[in-house]
Image (cartoon, rainbow, N blue to C red):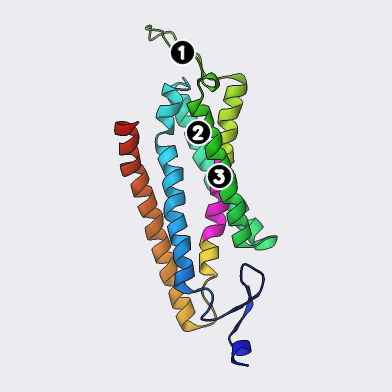
Amino acid sequence: MDEELDKWEGYVDWRNRPAFKGRHGGMLAASFVLVVEILENLAYLANASKLVLYLSKFMHFLPSSSADIVTNFMGTAFHLALLGGFLADAFFTTYCIYLISATIEVMGLLTLTVQAHIPSLNPETCMSANRNTPCQEVNHGNAAMLFVGLYVVALGVGGIKGSLPPHGAEQFDGNTPNGRKQRSTFFNYYVFCLSCGALLAVTFVVWIEDNKG
């Protein structure tokens, strides 16, 4: 009888069984969301922060073109957060969209990693000493692979950013004063963790890339 009274109406666990207050959710469950946000933002911004240099140095795009590509990539990622949030609210669950989006982002990152490490998927090494003679940009299938990888990452990032914050918020009971207070605290921690991931991405990871290769 007590268990029935403690049932969390409208929520189920990962096995689709009824969720119970005190056993499911809470700050402990939400802490996993915070850790995921640190790692996801670290991976995304660590790549984005060095992308202009990568595109101009290794893919032989002009600096202006490289900057445009990165701007479009990051803008697309953040705009797709609207799609991720819409799908999570209207058709699926936040957890489902997060899992799908995380898988998509990993696939995009793997695509970019494979291309970066296989010489035949990169443009020929530029040997021109004449600054007025531009190097041959990446083209054809290799260019398609580059842009597919970038925008698959953008799709995954958008889905995560549209579903992860509400998924964390769902771990708290909005019908109780304590639950509402914890939810507010969670969002404060969420923004802090997002900033921590960004800080690590543009300092520690960039230092490793510059000094350790």
Neighbour tally class for label 3: few under 14, some 14-19, many 20 plus, Cα within 10 Å: many
Q: Nearer the viewer, mark 1 or mark 2?
A: 2
Determine crowd level at label 2: few under 14, some 14-19, many 20+ residues with C-alpha closer than 10 A: few
User: Can residue 154 be seen at all in this image of the molecule?
Assistant: no
Residue 1 lies, with reference to residue 110, above or below; the image says: below
**Element type at mark 3:** helix
Residue bearing the label numbered 1: 135
Tell whether position 89 is magenta: no
Residue at 51%, 74% in the rendered image: 172
Q: Position of residue 122 (x, y in %)?
A: 51, 21
Q: Earlier in the sequence, mark 2 or mark 3?
A: 3
- The residue identified by callout 3 is 105
The answer to whether marks 1 and 3 mark residues whose Cβ atoms lie closer than 8 Å is no
Q: Nearer the viewer, mark 2 or mark 3?
A: 2
- Between marks 1 and 2, how big is the CA–CA gap? 22 Å
Q: Is residue 162 magenta?
A: yes
Q: x and y percent of residue 169 in the render?
A: 51, 68
Q: State whether residue 91 appears in this view.
A: yes
Nearest the viewer among 209 and 47 is 209
Above or below: residue 38 compared with residue 136: below
Q: Amino acid at mark 3?
A: Glu
Q: Residue at x 54, y 81 (%)?
A: 21
Q: Residue furthest bottom?
A: 1
Q: State the residue in front, 144 or 86.
A: 144
Magenta range is 153-164
What is the C-alpha distance between the residues marked 1 and 3?
30 Å
Which residue, given by chain and number where applicable, does mark 2 sit on? Answer: 113
Sequence-earlier tag: 1 or 3: 3
